[in-house]
Amino acid sequence: MITFVIWIGLGYPLEDALTRMVTVLVISCPHALGLAIPLVVARSTALSAKNGLFIKNRSGFEEAKRIDTIVFDKTGTLTEGTFGVTDVVLFNKDIEENEFIRLAASIESQSDHPIASRIVAEAQKRNIPLTEPETFDSLTGSGITGQVDGQTIYAVSPGYLKREGITYDNTAIAHLSDAGQTVIFILKDNIALGAIALADVVKESAKEAIDRLHRIGIKDQMLTGDNQKVANAVGEEIGIDEVIAEVLPHQKAETIKKLKKNGTRVGMTGDGINDAPALANADLGIAIGAGTDVAMDTADIVLVNSHPKDVVSIIELSKVTYRKMIQNLWWAAGITFLPSH
């Protein structure tokens, strides 16, 4: 401080006075200043690893504190990327829901279709015992059928009912079709018992991630190649600010560039090959750990646990890291003025 005052007093420019002041400061406490930043870097890296955040690009992580918009891919990032049962609708009130699921899963257990496996998984989740069908047959392009407990059970698509002229309560499932969900009808002896709706299940931490982003004042968007109805349904469920759907891979990157051109500092979160160009063009690229190698190679940070809420942890940790760096510099400078013993 004395050096700075003297050089300013002698009429030298501010830049020269600051240079001499910093020189004296560094000579006076080289170890303190030399450790101020590395200690914070080491500590934040350890905390990141402990919380499932793999930092590949240190400068990208440090810039995370300035991000004001986070863009999410949908499938595999905000959703599980696998089908799951979302709704069970009964047309016949004489049958209980668990019995309905038992009949459906028993016949579907003979199929190797992904949708069939999710219906069977739903029965297992509910601890419903299945029955081995006495017969089984595939209906090309329509579904499957077989005998369960002496009853002829069908698991078919809406097209089958239309072709066979089988009526059902359309108002009960209209909203499911409008939301882009896949609907499977279960029949007994050509009478519709009910329907099972399946969709890509939203991750449990997705809504928490969006809520936390809103609390810290960061905007969010969802960028997906899926159709608008499905995207809107997911966006509404988790409370996302803006949904951009039906985009091609190169259009994802263009959207990121457009946001940056408007002065927005953008973080992109994705898991697939299609997301790689967008991850590369974002100010901060974040890959889902369960995603493709291409996405993880392109990103600055990898979420090892694949939880969307960890995106918020990155931003919060980046802000704390920067704050601690500044604090350490002040402490290091303050050591100079402490009396030595």
Image: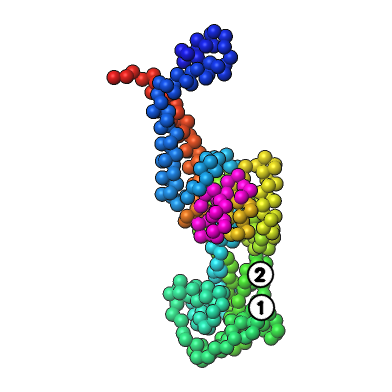
In this orientation, which residue lies closer to the viewer: 99 or 231? 231
The answer to whether any part of residue 297 appears in the image is yes
**Residue 232 sits in which quadrant?**
bottom right
Residue type at numbered disc 2: Ser
Would you place residue 161 above or below residue 233 in this image? below
Position of residue 149 in the picture relative to residue 195 (left or right): left
Residue 23: percent from left, percent from top: 47, 20
Residue 255: percent from left, percent from top: 68, 50
Residue 230: percent from left, percent from top: 65, 63
Sequence order check, earlier mark of 1 and 2: 1
Judging by the rendered image, the residue that carries numbered circle 1 is 158
The residue at 57%/49% (across/down) is 285
User: For residue 23: magenta?
Assistant: no
Question: In which quadrant of the rendered image does the C terminus lie?
Answer: top left
Would you place residue 127 above or below residue 316 in this image? below
Q: Distance between the residues labelled 1 and 2?
A: 10 Å
The residue at 50%/91% (across/down) is 134
In this orientation, which residue lies closer to the viewer: 57 or 151? 57
Magenta segment range? Answer: 280-302
Marks 1,2: beta carbons within 8 A? yes
The answer to whether any part of residue 232 appears in the image is no
On residue 177, the disc is 2
Would you place residue 240 above or below residue 177 in this image? above
**Residue 11 sits in which quadrant?**
top right
Residue 92: percent from left, percent from top: 58, 80
